[in-house]
Image (cartoon, rainbow, N blue to C red):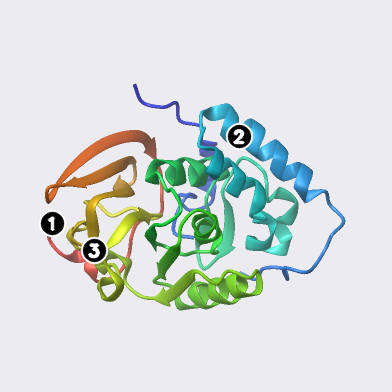
Amino acid sequence: MKRKVYFILVWVIFFSFSIGCEGDRRSPTSDSGRDFKAMREKMVETQIKGRGVKDPRVLSAMLKVERHHFVPKTYESQAYSDQPLPIGEGQTISQPYIVALMTELLGLKGEEKVLEIGTGSGYQAAILAELAREVYTIEIIEALAESAKNLLLKLGYQNIQVKTGDGYLGWPEVAPFDAIIVTCAPDHIPKPLIEQLKEGGRLVIPVGTFSQELKKVVKRSGKIETTDVIPVIFVPMTGEGVKQKR
């Protein structure tokens, strides 16, 4: 049985299909006096744990990573709310529940090499960095890639590599990967990503056009086993690679 969809559709439509490839962001050292720790605890308890995400490592990472650093100052007060938020360049930071759900589906144990397609604000990469040995993340919009790279370094993340590029093509120079997560939607599963996935590796990806299905893909004996998770709406994948045939 599919999980219940927990999106706030108004936000999804309002923010350009909302959940997608992740702006002027505030400094990691600035302080507005808000009790962000309490806000994160409430977020995890009600939005994430309360909706069925159980992996204790994922819950711990969602508690630790400070989402308010990854949103524009204008939206700082809403950083832990149950919705995606705009980050500039027509992109958004994903709803916290979706970040946690997709991360849990990867089944990370701590020693993995992970590829993320769609760096956006860098928030998902930071979550992954708490759970895996190495994180490689690709963003097609150069301004977002540079902003995320600088922010992640300021926050002390040393196990994340960021580059500007076409995510459809993956990162063959450092493949294969134990897990791949895609935060924008192609209309089919990109062949290069399957090729760069290790045997037994997991790929979590939204697939479709306006309306998509979040899928978990496992590579076994060179073939893929695909499971539909929930209907979702992500911004579309862009770039030259996505125009290639299936």
Asked if labels 3 and 1 touch by Cβ distance under 8 angstroms, the answer is: no
Asked if labels 1 and 2 touch by Cβ distance under 8 angstroms, the answer is: no
Decide if residue 59 is on the left or right side of residue 128.
right
Q: Residue furthest right?
A: 33
Q: Residue furthest top?
A: 1
Q: Identify the element where label 3 is drawn.
A: helix
Where residue 122 sits in the image (x, y, percent)? 54, 64
**Amino acid type for the residue under numbered disc 1:** Arg
Quarter of the image with the C terminus is bottom left
Q: Residue furthest front?
A: 111
Decide if residue 187 is on the left or right side of residue 140.
left
Residue neighbourhood size for the residue with mark 1, other residues' Cα within 10 Å, grouped as few (<14), some (14–19), many (≥20): few
Q: Report the Cα–Cα distance between label 2 and label 3.
A: 33 Å
Q: Identify the element where label 2 is drawn.
A: helix
**Which comes sooner in the sequence, label 2 or label 1?**
2
Q: Identify the element where label 1 is drawn.
A: loop
Q: Which mark is residue 246?
A: 1
Q: Is residue 117 above or below residue 106?
A: below
Where residue 142 sits in the image (x, y, percent)? 46, 78
Q: Report the Cα–Cα distance between label 2 and label 1.
A: 36 Å
Q: Is residue 208 above or below residue 55?
A: below
Decide if residue 177 is on the left or right side of residue 22.
left
Residue for badge 3: 242
Residue for badge 2: 47
**Amino acid type for the residue under numbered disc 2:** Gln
**Which comes sooner in the sequence, label 2 or label 3?**
2
Q: Is residue 55 above or below residue 14?
A: above
Q: At 27% across and 76% down in the image, what residue appears?
A: 173
Camera-nearest residue between 175 and 50: 175
Camera-nearest residue between 78 and 224: 224
